[in-house]
Every structure is written in structure tokens, then in C-alpha cells.
Amino acid sequence: MNRISLLLIALLACEVSLAQSPFYLGADFSYVNEMEDCGVRYYESQEAKDPYAIFNDRGCNLARLRLWHSPAWYDQLNEGRRYSDLADVKRSIARAQAQGMEVLLDFHLSDTWADPSSQLVPEAWLPVVNDLEVLKDSLYQYIYRTLEELEANQLLPEMVQIGNETNKGILLSPQDNAVWTLDWDRNAALFNHAIKAVRDFEAQVGKRIKVVLHLAGPDNAEWLLDGFANNGVSDFDIIGLSYYWAWHMPTTIEETGALISTLRQLYNKEVLIVETGYIWTTEWNDTANNIISETHPDYHPASPNNQRDWLIALTREVAARDGLGVLYWEPCWVSSPCFTQWGQGSHQEHAAFFDFDNQLLVPGGIEWMSQDYGQTTSQGPLPLPALEVQIMANSFSGDVKIKQHTDQNQVLDYSVMDTMGQVLLSGQFEGAEVQFQLSDLPFGLYLIEVRNAKRMVKTKKMIYGKS
């Protein structure tokens, strides 16, 4: 069978899979192997149990796993064992598959944590970080060879993420990583070459792998996706979002749901919450600083019940907007005697689904997976109301773009106000779009309003300066 025939098979498989995609209730299990090697045992009803089995029993159908290129910093911790490298990921995929779960493989494209504030190129590629052609080839070969090795071991994931929370781009030099930078020509070339590696591998083996682009924060997603679209990055399947109340407030669950509808309408892509989390206690169980402290006013105080109820509310909204599902970040990252780069224990034990004795919390957050969300499959885009005006903002750089989506452009007035209602910036436009920056304003919370002569057309809250 030739290459073209294999590609056609893959594309047909794509059409079938999109029509029959399950509604995903999933979790990131990247810490499980490390926790168990550090002596952790997980318990349900006082009996030790495989955590993958615990989650499978509750309906978990998607396991997310991070992959670092060469996490050599692990060599100086604990007993020098490395995790989230390819060998560790193989162990994790096998465990997920044994429980019947699909797998989302998260290429961090770094040796360490990649997030909105850090996208540091792997050390192995540092000598070519400013040689785009060589860097593109290194990225292509890395993704292709990784998939090839996983396929050889019957461990091929159903989905792959190209980068993790890629708001400032990917594969940055130490100099560019230290500041805000987003070179769209470079960024788009890297993303397209990474996606090409996946598509070429699909054609070679005749199997379909869905490609996810992962963005942090609902507030930034529209601005970033507009950048991807304008720079020719389109051959992906799923828009992945991180949404945590602690990081992304005051954006509400309902506003996140409205964003899902907007993104599906504009780009005809599935939308998946690939990361979320909520605390069940404000207590600590070790000396490692915890990274989340805030609770939503409607789900306060922190408790196992409120953790569950917040997740149920979010997932109901995602399902109602025909989103693809919700994944929880690190529900098994409990305290252990081992060390992270910053302290002994876990930075997230207060948001896990287990108490400080590693007993499953019931009632608690895991029960979110067992609810009926009114749909079992995603049937594709639903009829949506017409999108009149879009406000796109980048909280990191202060860039704002307002775009009209009507056949005949209106005369629109826009204003930027502070929390006291004082207008700090305003203007008027009639064309397809207008762009401006908040760079002269101090970091803080702002409200952007767009009006025509008769009514308010669109509003958007923006936290300028939050990474």
C-alpha cells in the first residue's frame, strides 16, 4: 500500500473518530510512578489499590502524560531516578491502556516545566536554537522518532499535545525565555513542522493521532488562536485550554463555556479542558509550598464536597457547550518523602483526590467523574448564535484586538475602564478590526467595553500583567 493510500485511510479514520469521540473525563497521571517509587501507596476503603484502577472504576477514560526531553535535573534528586522521560512515559501508557483508557501525550518540548512563563528549549537543542531550519528538523525528528518507538511497543497514544501552555511560543533561548517574546514567523514554522511530523507518521502507519494545541487561560485563548490562524497554523484537531479558578479568575465557568462556543464556531475544532484543579483543604502535609490557595465564592470554603461540586459545575458547562471534556491536573500528586526542585513533598497535595493518609476522599473530587452530563458523544458543532464582535486580549503583553464579524461593519466605540469605572482609554472604529495596547497602564484588572450607537455589544474582563 502506498503512502497516499495510507494517508487517505488516516483521514477517513479522522472523520469517523471525530463523529464518535467520547466525552472525556480524565486526569493527568504523570506523578504516579514517581510517587509509588517514593513509597506512596494509594488506598480506597482502607485497602491499597492501583490508582489507575481507582479512576477507571469512576469512569476515567483519558490519561494525560507529560514528556520531558532530557530531565537531567532529576539526577540530583532523591535516588537519581528520572521521570516523565520516554522510559517513564512508556510505563505510564501501559498502565493506562491496561485500564482501557485513551492517552494524551503531552510533549513539553523542554527538559523541565513548560508553562506560560517558561518555554526553555531542551539543552540538547540549545546550540541550534537560533538556526530555525536545524531546530525545525530536530523537532520533527524528535516527535516522529518518539511516536515510532511507542508504536513499536504498541503504546501509541490517541492524542498528542504540541507543547504545554504555549502562550509565549515554544523552544525559546534562555534570553528570549527571560522576557515576553512571541515571534509568530518562528513560532508558526515550529508548530507546523511539529504537526507535520505527526501527520507524516500517521501516513506511514495508517493510524490517526489527534493533535492538540494547548493554551493557558480562557482570557488569552482568542488572541492566541487568532495569531495561529493568521500565521497559517491550522492542521490541528483540538484546542486545549487550562482553566483554574486560582489562576484565571475572575473568568467564570459560564464565561469559559461561552468561549468554548465561540472557538468552535470560529475554528470548527473540538475544545478540551486539558487542565483544571481545585483545592479540598488549605492545610499542608509537607514542607513544599502549595501553589493554589484561592477558592471561588460559591464553592467556599475549601472542602472535598466543594472540590467535587466546582468540577461538576465546570463539566456541566463544558458538556452543554458541546466541549470535548475535562481533565484534572495531578489528582495523585500527594505528599511523599521525596523532593521536587523546590522542596520536600508535593506542591499540590491539598488539591489531590486523596487525604493526607492517601485514602481516597469520598465524598470528594473523584465523584465528579461519575456524574451524568447529558451526553456521551460529541456530535460536532451545534447551531450557534451569530458572532457579532470579538474582543481578543493578551494579558502578558497587553495587546488588545477588537474584530467585527458582521457583513457590514458598524461604527463601534470602545473603552477600557478600571475597577472604579474610570475610563482610561477609548476610541472609535468602523473597519474590520482595531488594535491597541495597555502598555501605558499599570498591571491590574480592566473591563473592555464595545458599544454601538444603541447598545452594549460586547464586554471582556482582562487581568493585564498576569502570567
Image (cartoon, rainbow, N blue to C red):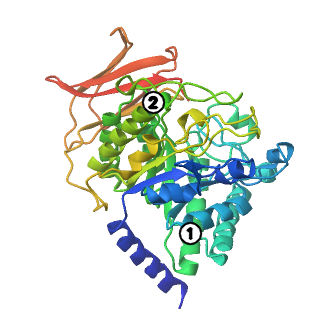
Residue 91, position as x, y percentages in the image: 67, 63
* Figure quadrant of residue 225: top left
Above or below, 342 relative to 141: above
Q: Which mark identifies residue 98?
A: 1
Which amino acid type is marked by label 2? Ser
Q: Find residue 454 and report its horizontal and vertical position in percent.
A: 13, 23
Q: Secondary structure at mark 2?
A: loop
Front-most of residues 386 and 76: 76
Q: Callout 1: 10 Å neighbours few (<14), some, many (20+)?
A: few
Q: Nearer the viewer, residue 212 or 56?
A: 56
Question: Which residue in the structure is indicated by mark 2?
Answer: 303
Q: Position of residue 197 (x, y in %)?
A: 60, 67
The image position of residue 8, as x and y in percent, is 44, 80
Q: Is residue 273 above or below residue 394?
A: below
For this view, does 464 lie left or right of residue 150?
Answer: left
Q: Residue at x 47, y 53 (%)?
A: 26
**Which circle's residue, 1 or 2, is located before the other in the chain?**
1
Q: Which mark is residue 441?
A: none
The span from disc 1 to disc 2 (Cα, nearest Å) is 32 Å
